[in-house]
Image (cartoon, rainbow, N blue to C red):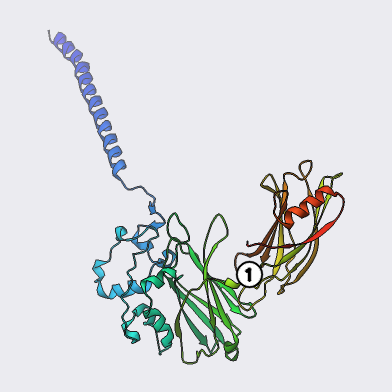
């Protein structure tokens, strides 16, 4: 009997062990599943390891990246003024009050009739060391009516200074206000400024492009070394205000011409403002002429083009001559298939090129062929300006069509003609 009881007890041990093992396995699986669910939920709520920067129309919403305010065209002077009024703990990023370019909307200051500069906008005259704005300029600011503002192209604000220690002439382009909208769809502009020191045109600079704004705040300083103070009176500053266009030539908004004769810079920085005027209206009276020689070789199916001379080219600016060269474009069915260009001729309205180009014609005859001549002014500092344009082809009017008809009727004959250039 004891032996049978012991044997029965021994048989029950595996059963108990199996039951505990089953419970342990179920518990382990449940615990593992719970841990996986917790990890998955925590992972979905956890901030990603990389720094995610959201950009809304070029505006970074992270406050720590708002230090470079100039690239948004922000008005750092007005922000500095507001900073003294607002407590430090009230600094925040209000995207709803910004436009698509990241700028706060600017309110036009109320201009009083008092000639006292202190009653005018402190942004314009806050840095004045002495009374450097003439009464005429103050009168031009205070006398603008609503009808006059519609015809105006805006106002340019800048400062002039001469550093006697470094013998350097310093120009700070501060801002432009009230520019016209060159983009009809967005009713805004992408302005930038080119500046040249006349009459020698040795110094050419330009500002950066500020996107989608009619009141760009550039605040860029240009220092020109090696200019003696005695020569400042003989110089003239030429500002050209343009709007950048990605798909075609930049639009010219206007210009400002500042003769430095009579301007005294020995007493410190001089703040100035000038109205922007339409650029060089006299240039529209004539673009000059171009002498072209053409010869069509029907046997080899080639067109020989000789750019001979240019004469009576207009000035590129008010007191400086242009540096012309000619760009030749060959078109087949309104598609450009080849391009050439001549060398640059320095400072002359009557250039002699005498350069020959040979083009292979991809079709029989010249019916679908046209050739375009662009006379440009070479400018190292910025995009070259088109002085005049000429098109020769079967559909061209005037002397361009006549010249083309002659070379088609008389192949293998070199025929030269003068042509009037039209607006670029």
- Provide the residue designation for mark 1: 285
- Residue 392 shows in the view: yes
Q: Is residue 205 left or right of residue 220?
A: right
Quarter occupied by the C terminus: bottom right
Q: Please state which of residues 287 and 323 is positioned toward the viewer in this rendering.
A: 287
Label 1 sits on a secondary structure element that is helix
Between 354 and 391, the residue placed more toward the observer is 391
The answer to whether residue 133 of the structure is visible from this angle is no
Vertical order, 263 against 140 (above or below): below
| Image x and y of residue 2, in percent | 13, 10
Q: Residue at x 85, y 50 (%)?
A: 410
Q: Nearer the viewer, residue 42 or 108?
A: 108
Which quadrant: the N terminus?
A: top left
Name the spot of residue 21 as percent of width and height, x first. 24, 23
Residue 311 in the image: above or below residue 129: above
Front residue (pair 32, 45): 45
């Amino acid at each position: 009997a004891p032996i049978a009881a012991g044997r029965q007890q021994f048989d029950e041990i595996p059963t108990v062990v199996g039951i505990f093992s089953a419970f342990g396995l179920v518990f382990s699986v449940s615990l593992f599943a719970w841990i996986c669910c917790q990890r998955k939920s925590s992972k979905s709520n956890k901030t990603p390891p990389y720094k995610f920067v959201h950009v809304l129309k070029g505006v970074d919403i992270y406050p720590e990246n708002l230090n470079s305010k100039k690239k948004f065209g922000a008005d750092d002077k007005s922000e500095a003024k507001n900073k003294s009024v607002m407590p430090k703990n009230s600094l925040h990023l209000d995207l709803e009050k910004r436009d698509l370019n990241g700028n706060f909307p600017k309110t036009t200051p109320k201009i009083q009739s008092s000639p006292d500069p202190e009653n005018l906008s402190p942004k314009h005259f806050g840095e004045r060391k002495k009374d450097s704005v003439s009464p005429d300029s103050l009168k031009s600011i205070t006398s603008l009516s609503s009808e006059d503002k519609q015809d105006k192209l805006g106002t340019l604000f800048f400062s002039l200074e001469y550093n006697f220690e470094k013998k350097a002439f310093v120009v700070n382009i501060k801002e432009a206000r009230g520019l016209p909208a060159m983009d009809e769809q967005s009713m805004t502009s992408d302005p930038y400024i080119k500046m040249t020191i006349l009459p020698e045109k040795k110094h050419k600079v330009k500002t950066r492009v500020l996107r989608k704004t009619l009141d760009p705040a550039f605040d860029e300083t240009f220092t020109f070394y090696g200019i003696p103070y005695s020569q400042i009176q003989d110089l003239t500053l030429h500002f050209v205000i343009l709007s950048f266009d990605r798909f075609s030539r930049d639009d010219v908004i206007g210009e400002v011409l500042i003769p430095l004769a009579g301007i005294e810079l020995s007493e410190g920085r001089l703040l100035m403002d000038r109205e922007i005027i339409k650029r060089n209206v006299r240039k529209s009276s004539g673009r000059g002429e171009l002498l072209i020689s053409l010869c069509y070789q029907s046997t080899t199916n080639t067109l020989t083009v000789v750019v001979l001379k240019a004469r009576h080219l207009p000035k590129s600016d008010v007191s400086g001559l242009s540096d012309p060269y000619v760009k030749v474009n060959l078109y087949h069915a309104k598609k450009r298939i080849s391009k050439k260009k001549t060398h640059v001729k320095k400072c002359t309205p009557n250039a002699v090129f005498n350069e020959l180009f040979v083009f292979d014609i991809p079709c029989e005859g010249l019916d679908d062929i046209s050739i375009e001549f662009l006379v440009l002014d070479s400018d190292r500092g910025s995009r070259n300006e088109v002085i005049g344009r000429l098109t020769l082809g079967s559909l061209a009017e005037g002397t361009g069509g006549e010249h083309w008809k002659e070379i088609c009727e008389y192949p293998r004959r070199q025929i030269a003609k003068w042509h009037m250039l039209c607006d670029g």
